[in-house]
Structures are given as C-alpha cells and as structure tokens.
Image (tube, helix red, strand yellow):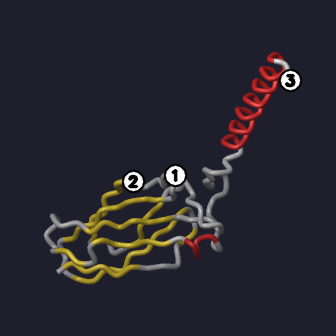
Amino acid sequence: MSKRTTTIIIILLTLALFLLTYLTFKSNLFFKQNTLQPPSPSSLQNSYLFASPLKAKADLQEKIRITVILLDNQGLGIKDQKIELISDQALEIEAIQAITNDSGTAIFDLSSSSPQNYQISAKTGSYTLPQQLTINYY
C-alpha cells in the first residue's frame, strides 16, 4: 500500500470518528434528560421528597431541608418545573431552588415557631406528588 493511500485512509477514519462522536453527543445518547414533557400523574409515582433532619427546634432558626426529586416514567429528572410545597400556614418556607434543575431537584428550607408535627407534600402545576412527609418542630 502506498504512502498516499495510507494517509487518505487515516484521514477518512479520523473524520468518521469525529462524525460518530458528534452524532452520539448530539443525540443525547449518554446524557438524557426530560425537558420537553411536563410531568403526568403516572410519572409522579417515580418522584419523591425527603427531609433532613426530621426534627428541629421551633425557634425560626433551625431549618429542615426538603428536597423534591421530580422524575419521569423512565426515572429521568424533569427540569424547569416549578415546585410548590403544601403545608400548614405556620411554617416559614424558603425556596432555595423552586424550579427543578437538570436532575429534577428542587430544594426548600422550612422553619417554624410553633411546636408540632407538620404534614408536607409537593405539587407541580395541577399535580400533587403522592408521597407525604411528616416533620416535627419541638
């Protein structure tokens, strides 16, 4: 094989490799995220929320962080969705990140001056997540 033929083959293989790499990333084969479909009641079954810690002093100083993870039917995060917490009026809610990020996460900090248990749930649009939390201020 001549030197010229070898050079042409190497150039073609290099171009093919770059094209394949470009198409792979363009198609989001490795980096899927759901940005087009709003959540539906069935996809909310995969979504969840959790609190840390579950108890805090009722002094408006100690905070309980609520994290909401909004997922589609395939378990992928749904981004750019506004999340609202549903709770008792006595709770102070600070939206750290009310719009879900690329992984479908929204974050809130809660505090209270009234010692009691509180039920917390979350909603997006007209849909409420099925899971609820109970947190305690003492």
Comparing labels 2 and 3, the label whose residue is closer to the camera: 3
Residue type at mark 1: give it: Asp
Other residues around mark 3 within 10 Å, as few (<14) / some (14–19) / many (≥20): few
Other residues around mark 2 within 10 Å, as few (<14) / some (14–19) / many (≥20): some
The spot of residue 22 in percent (x, y) is 69, 36
Look at 62% across and 65% down and name the residue there.
72
How far is mark 2 from mark 1, CA to CA? 12 Å
Look at 43% across and 71% down and name the residue there.
49
Decide which of tag 1 and tag 3 comes sooner along the chain.
Answer: 3
Residue type at mark 2: give it: Gln
Residue type at mark 3: give it: Met
Q: Under tag 2, what secondary structure?
A: strand
- Residue at the disc numbered 2: 97
Image vertical order of residue 113 relative to residue 3, above or below: below
Image vertical order of residue 87 relative to residue 71, above or below: below
Along the horizontal axis of the image, is 29 left or right of 129? right
Disc number placed over residue 1 in the picture, else none: 3
